[in-house]
Amino acid sequence: MMTTTNGKPPVNPHIGRWNQSVRLISIAATAFATLALSASSGEPKFAEFSIANPPGYPHGSTHEFTFGKHGDLWITQQNQARLIHLRNGKLTAFVLGKPGPQGPGPHGIEVDHDGNLWLTFQFTNRIVKVSPEGKILAEYPIPTKTVANPGPHGLTVASDGDVWWTGKEGGVIGKLDPKTAHFSLYQLRNPASQPIYISEASDHNLWFTELTNNAIGRITPAGKITEITLPGTNSRPIAILEGPDRKMWFTMEHGHGFGTVDRDGHGLKTYRANPPTAEPAGLAFDRYGHPWLQYMTPDMIGRIHPDMSVTPYCIHPSCNAPPSAVMHRIHLGPDNRLWFTELGLDRIGKIVSGY
């Protein structure tokens, strides 16, 4: 374990400038229009909404999202360097810095108990706190003496208020105590493992995926790490979270499937997706506790049945609209519907019926 702290309040050399000059781009509800509502009778129906990008901005980088205390939606656009807010049909874009690889690269996002947002700035190695009004409250620079470029990617706020994140570029799991601005960094065995997703289980341990190390892992609040190798050699696990059965469920992009494991790390089982060549990315449970898969390709979302078979449903009529949607993340919303992002098309969508 590597543990560091600066012992000082969070540093934000840009906060004064940003608070004065951050542009708020209000986009009329018509610009966030429903693009499609498609499905055959008896199948899930999908609604998609387009997020408009300003002229000259990068496209195809709509990543993570979360819900605020009032049911509003917050979305990160990494290469656009924007934070998108949707409430009561109105979409507002908060520009967080310069777009592209020279900008902050916002990615992971979650809301804490007070309604504040926490983000990872992957390109500038910072954890950022944002108010429910979209104002940057503080930036916490990650110490880089022991890991030169941690690259914070995924993020979750634990039940005790600590902010946990995955260091994709540095092969580390990180923890920030917001009360003290203290960082703890925990190095994985393989620095090139690219941990990307992290979530808290009901026993308060954290689980994460190692994209290029063919493994998933568990870390205790005290920092003890257990890594579990998956079948094959390059399964590329992406999402992991606890199901209503108290097992950890995860997706495997190149493993073309999904799996479960007991919270004690035993009982690992894996299953194939449908179609067999599908690349699962996101995973969520609906209001009834039924698991759903979101495929990076083709443009499908699949329902997992009790026998672990999967029924896939096309988002677009062709199941592979050009360019590919690149389905990225899926979550249950406060309206009891599943919402998802389409990274490649800069869209947000939801399953409106058919559960």
Image (cartoon, helix red, strand yellow):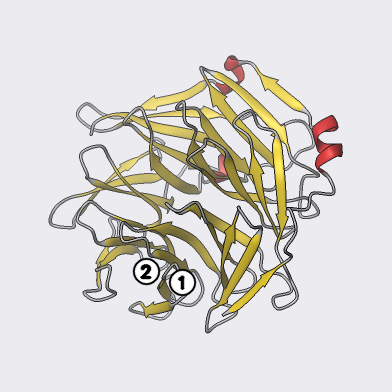
Q: Is residue 319 visible?
A: no
Left or right of 228 in this view: 126: right
Q: Which residue is mark 2?
A: 255
For this rendering, which residue is in front, 327 or 69?
69
Q: Which residue is mark 1?
A: 222
State which quadrant residue 343 falls in. top right
Where residue 80 appears, as percent x and y from the top left, is 71, 42
State which quadrant residue 127 falls in. bottom right
- The residue located at (71%, 45%) in the rendering is 138
From this view, report whether residue 63 is shown above or below residue 352. Answer: below
Q: Mark 2 or mark 1, which is nearer the start of the sequence?
A: 1
Numbered disc 1: secondary structure: loop
Where residue 326 appears, as percent x and y from the top left, is 50, 48
Quarter of the image that includes the N terminus: bottom right
Q: Amino acid at mark 1?
A: Ala
Q: Residues within 10 Å of mark 2 (few under 14, many from 20)?
A: many
State which quadrant residue 252 falls in. bottom left
Labels 1, 2: front one = 1
For this rendering, which residue is in front, 44 or 314?
44
Q: Which mark is residue 96?
A: none
For this rendering, which residue is in front, 28 or 92?
92
Quarter of the image that includes the C terminus: top left
- The residue located at (70%, 55%) in the rendering is 140
Q: Amino acid at mark 2?
A: Gly
Q: Is residue 238 visible?
A: yes
Left or right of 32 in this view: 267: left
Left or right of 287 in this view: 55: right
